[in-house]
Amino acid sequence: MDVTIRPLGETEIERELFRPFTRRQEVNLCLRRDGDRWVVRPDPFIDDWNEEEYAGLVQCLRHTIRTGGRVWGAFTGGALKGFASVENGIFGGDNRYMDLSCIHVSQDMRHAGIGRRLFDRAKAFARERGAGKLYISAHSAVESQAFYAAMGCVDAREINREHAEREPFDRQLECAL
């Protein structure tokens, strides 16, 4: 399978771009904070996006580009099958974080190496801009957590309060560059 990964321009980010992309994720087990440790607990739900959420995604990704961040798309046969974004700006004092704000792979293309390739692009972008680490507010599903662990992510030393408050069940991670 031939997959092309390239930066996306602001004008190509529109709802139509995401038509071949399937966000759906059936979650059964999640990591949940229990005191000072993370434990696996059953918490079944289906994570999918509706039209309103796709509209919000389009606006967020356009904003990322307008403000100096980067968005990449992964395409196969001309169809978008994955994307990632990194926000502009460094935060976090000595840890010098850049925010990996999105990374998603279409349900039909998971486990094909697309996520790793997108993650590597995000790391390179952050490194080139002087960051020391990527910051990730990571979905708590065990499958998502396994991906981030395979990428070398660990619990963040500094917590971005905005992320933690917006998504209280997310695990706040970092990845050294």
Image (cartoon, rainbow, N blue to C red):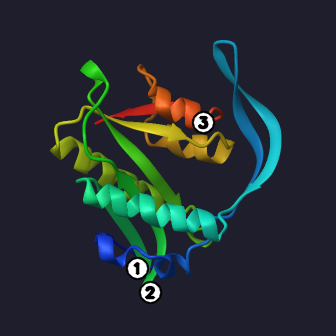
Between marks 1 and 2, how big is the CA–CA gap? 8 Å
Residue behind mark 2: 77
Image coordinates of residue 49 in percent, x first then y, are 65, 64
Task: Estimate the x, y position of residue 1 in percent, counting from the top left.
Answer: 46, 79
Q: Quadrant of residue 126?
A: top left
Q: Residues within 10 Å of mark 3 (few under 14, many from 20)?
A: many
10 Å crowding of disc 1: few (<14), some (14-19), many (20+): few
- Residue at image position (54%, 30%) is 164
Q: Are marks 1 and 2 in contact (CB under 8 Å)?
A: yes
CA separation, marks 2 and 3?
33 Å
Sequence order check: which comes first, mark 3 or mark 1?
A: 1
Q: Amino acid at mark 3?
A: Asp
Q: Report which residue position mark 3 lands on.
A: 170
Type of amino acid at the residue the image marks with label 2: Gly
Indicate which disc, 2 or 3, sits on the residue closer to the N terminus: 2
Which is closer to the viewer, label 3 or label 1? 3
Image position, residue 43 (x, y; %): 81, 41
The residue where tag 1 is placed is 2
Please name whichever residue, 150 or 21, is drawn nearer the observer in this view of the structure.
Answer: 21
Q: Residue furthest bottom?
A: 77
